[in-house]
Image: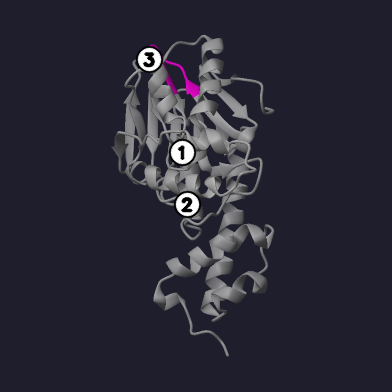
Amino acid sequence: MSAGRGFQEVAERVWVARYEWFDVNVTAIGSDRGLVVVDTHGSAAAAGGVIDDLRRLGAGDVAAVVNTHAHFDHTFGNGAFRAAYGDIPIHAHEVAAAETITAGERIKAAVADDPDDPHREDMLATEVVPADHTFSSAVVLDLGDRLVELVHPGRGHTAGDLVVRLPDVDVVLGGDLVEESAPPWLGQDSWPLDWPLSLDMVLGLTTSSSVVVPGHGSPVDRDFVEEQRNTLGIVAETIRDLAVRGVPVDQALAAGEWPWEPRLLEHAVRRGYEHLPRSQKRLPLV
């Protein structure tokens, strides 16, 4: 599934649109009570394009929104969807909802300092609207003719990740716990030691026939998720090994053997060292 082709059906009444900016996916789930849209893109203006694509799809009005986590490229369109469809519920994990405004302010501050960003003005003009329907572990949305399961499998890409499971068609929407078009982003709010265990929970929601929609890139299968889980496991175990051997955090990136380019793992190493219990750390070797 290439970027920029509008909504494509990946299972019965499950459509995914892949947008070039951040190669982000937006998913629409059809039901007799309207569409549930999962993630809303990175600005109010970008969300306007998503809404135009949904109207061309002709599968009904949007009845609810789900945010897979708090990052701007998945939440900044929330307000545009409210403007287009009224006071629809916006669902997210409780941590993601609590962090949405803070995360939005952080990215706005960063883009304000970058006059060359082509999306700068659109992002700065976007009102950040957090979810108002939250849960802690799992919740089921009853859409009449189908059920939509929202599950918090644990911390990983952020502390408030959720996945969406559609049991009637064996589809799982992985958010940024799963990424296809680039290595998973272990940013400054990631949980690299927890992420493999969270993907174990996601794998438990899949079968050999599942379609898994990542936060970025083309849909994948269970084998892809398992491989990514194992690679993230290597990152986590490498961090543990370096810390146990007393390698200082500022030397760990150079000292480790990593499955991805070290520059992609700067935050992961720092965060991993921070999250390790004291019993798993040694004093730096001298």
Q: Is residue 195 above or below residue 133?
A: below
Reading the image, the residue beneath label 3 is 145
Q: Nearest the camera: 116 or 242?
A: 116
Q: Image check: 214 left or right of 99?
A: right
Image depth: mark 3 or mark 2 in front? 2
Q: Image check: 181 left or right of 190?
A: right
Image coords of residue 71 (percent x, y): 47, 43
Quadrant hosting residue 235: bottom right
Crowding at dot 3, Cα within 10 Å, few <14 / some 14-19 / many 20+, comes out as few
Reading the image, the residue beneath label 2 is 156
Q: Are marks 3 and 1 in contact (CB under 8 Å)?
A: no
Q: Of callouts 1 and 2, which one flags the residue occurring earlier in the amino acid sequence?
A: 2
Q: Are marks 1 and 2 in contact (CB under 8 Å)?
A: no
The quadrant of the rendering that contains the C terminus is bottom right
Magenta-tinted stretch: 28-36
Image depth: mark 1 or mark 2 in front? 2
Amino acid carrying label 3: it is Asp
- On the question of residue 174 being in view, the answer is no
Quadrant hosting residue 262: bottom right
